[in-house]
């Protein structure tokens, strides 16, 4: 059956003679907890452990009942987290291989990968030796951030590729781990795992530096990096000086409903930059001044600026800015914000055990990806607007179906033998 195959490469550390629940059954229950937006392990016992739920799990995995949340936690403490990470990457890799994400490539070539950090767990005491610390007004906070690499698309997909945990090697290191150090580790893993995938990295201003430029050039990746006012002062000055001499590098673009949003693009190519290590780089700078007219008829203008190694022309400048640079926000909105406030409870401590917390994080990424496939697929049809209405309601409906809907082995056999085609919203 399909679900056990997803976890067949994950080693089960338990004594085979004492196993009540298979590893896929436990992983499935945890993923169902996230998909149904139950918000904590404790809710598994209240909402999933019904007679019909137990019957379904028996049909799917041969389990005698629905496992308790504590049972899932105990096994997650012993499972190799890096093997579960491989399941997450394998999910997204399957979408790439099956060309499900093919229509959303930038310029029909590059998969846009947004890389950003997010805090997951926060404590007022030292949770483990790997905690990062932050002291403000005499109060010390202990926290665990992660650095995520997600493929993002214009229609709202945010599919996890790789995760790098930001953690200290010991309780009191000379220098704490940070996003930049984690990025160097993540980039090496990403290149090794997907060596030939054409990528454009969408990054925030923290990564506007020589080492990042060098890594992207070495790995044959394109990049679009937010250029803030305080970043790369010499590049800013060159842009200001040269843009006046290149009036042809300007384009006005209208977008949004009725074309009411106006974007003015200006760009300068081939700016020389020498980093602090003495390495030389050739960079292009793209600026977008966007003016929106609100309901009161007032004009609001926002300026965006990026540094990139992509060639900029009047034909590609709008796509490069909107589908390459600004799409980075998808990792914040459709990614982190959805997992924080959309019922997944990213900042909830599903386990205080360090290894189990990582495994639960990966299972959440699988659940979020499955939910996105349901939300954006065409199988729900008109039911989405007529009877479902929101992604949170979809979780509730799935929960009620799990609790009450009878399911037999014959039902599953019929569904698995059907050949169907799922199309995704490309708007």
Image (tube, helix red, strand yellow):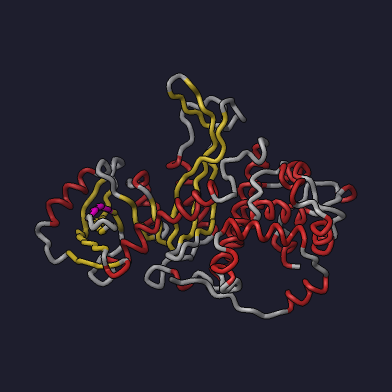
Instruction: Tell me which secondary structure the magenta stretch mostly adopts.
Output: strand
Residue 302 in magenta?
A: yes
Q: Is residue 177 left or right of residue 267?
A: right
- Residue 131 in the image: above or below residue 10: above
- The residue drawn where x is 46% and y is 73% is 103
Tell me where residue 283 appears, x and y as whole percent. Answer: 26, 55
Q: Is residue 114 visible?
A: yes
Q: Nearer the viewer, residue 258 or 220?
A: 258
Kindly indicate the quadrant of the structure image that contains residue 55. bottom right
- So how many labels did they put on this image? 0
- Residue 117 in the image: above or below residue 408: above
Q: Residue furthest front?
A: 296
Kindly indicate the quadrant of the structure image that contains residue 408. bottom right
Q: Is residue 41 left or right of residue 332?
A: right
Q: Is residue 337 left or right of residue 237?
A: right
Quarter in which the C terminus is drawn: bottom left
Quarter in which the N terminus is drawn: bottom right
Tell me where residue 226 appears, x and y as whole percent. Answer: 32, 51
Q: Is residue 102 left or right of residue 352?
A: left
- The residue drawn where x is 56% and y is 70% is 377
Residues in magenta, as a range? 299-305
Tell me where residue 119 appears, x and y as whole percent. Answer: 51, 40
Q: Residue furthest left?
A: 245
Residue 392 in magenta?
A: no
- The residue drawn where x is 55% and y is 51% is 342
- The residue drawn where x is 21% and y is 60% is 267
Tell me where residue 389 appears, x and y as whole percent. Answer: 55, 63
């Amino acid at each position: 059956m399909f679900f056990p195959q997803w976890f067949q490469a994950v080693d089960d550390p338990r004594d085979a003679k004492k196993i009540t629940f298979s590893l896929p059954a436990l992983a499935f229950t945890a993923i169902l907890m996230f998909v149904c937006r139950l918000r904590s392990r404790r809710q598994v016992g209240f909402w999933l452990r019904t007679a019909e739920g137990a019957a379904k799990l028996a049909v799917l995995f041969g389990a005698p009942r629905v496992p308790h949340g504590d049972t899932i936690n105990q096994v997650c403490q012993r499972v190799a987290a890096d093997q579960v990470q491989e399941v997450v990457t394998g999910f997204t890799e399957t979408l790439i291989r099956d060309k499900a994400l093919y229509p959303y490539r930038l310029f029909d070539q590059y998969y846009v990968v947004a890389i950003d950090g997010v805090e997951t767990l926060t404590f007022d005491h030292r949770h483990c030796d790997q905690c990062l610390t932050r002291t403000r007004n005499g109060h010390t906070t202990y926290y665990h951030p992660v650095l995520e690499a997600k493929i993002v698309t214009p229609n709202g997909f945010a599919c996890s590729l790789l995760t790098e945990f930001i953690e200290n090697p010991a309780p009191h290191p000379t220098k704490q781990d940070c996003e930049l150090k984690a990025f160097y580790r993540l980039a090496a893993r990403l290149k090794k795992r997907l060596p030939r995938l054409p990528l454009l990295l969408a990054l925030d201003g923290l990564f506007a530096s020589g080492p990042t430029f060098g890594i992207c050039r070495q790995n044959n990746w394109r990049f679009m990096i937010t250029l803030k006012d305080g970043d790369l002062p010499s590049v800013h000055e060159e842009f200001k000086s040269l843009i006046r001499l290149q009036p042809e590098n300007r384009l006005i673009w209208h977008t949004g409903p009725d074309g009411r949003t106006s974007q003015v693009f200006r760009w300068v190519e081939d700016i020389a930059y020498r980093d602090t290590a003495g390495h030389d780089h050739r960079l292009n700078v793209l600026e977008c001044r966007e003016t929106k007219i609100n309901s009161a008829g007032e004009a609001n203008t926002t300026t965006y600026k990026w540094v990139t190694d992509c060639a900029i022309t009047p034909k590609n400048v709008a796509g490069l800015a909107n589908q390459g640079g600004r799409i980075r926000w998808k990792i914040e909105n459709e990614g982190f914000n959805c997992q924080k406030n959309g019922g997944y409870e990213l900042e909830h401590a599903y386990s205080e055990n360090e290894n189990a917390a990582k495994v639960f994080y990966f299972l959440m990424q699988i659940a979020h990806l499955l939910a996105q496939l349901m939300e954006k697929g065409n199988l729900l049809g008109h039911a989405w607007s007529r009877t479902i209405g929101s992604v949170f309601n979809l979780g509730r409906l799935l929960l009620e179906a799990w609790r009450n809907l009878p399911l037999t082995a014959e039902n599953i056999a019929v569904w698995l033998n059907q050949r169907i085609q799922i199309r995704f919203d490309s708007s």
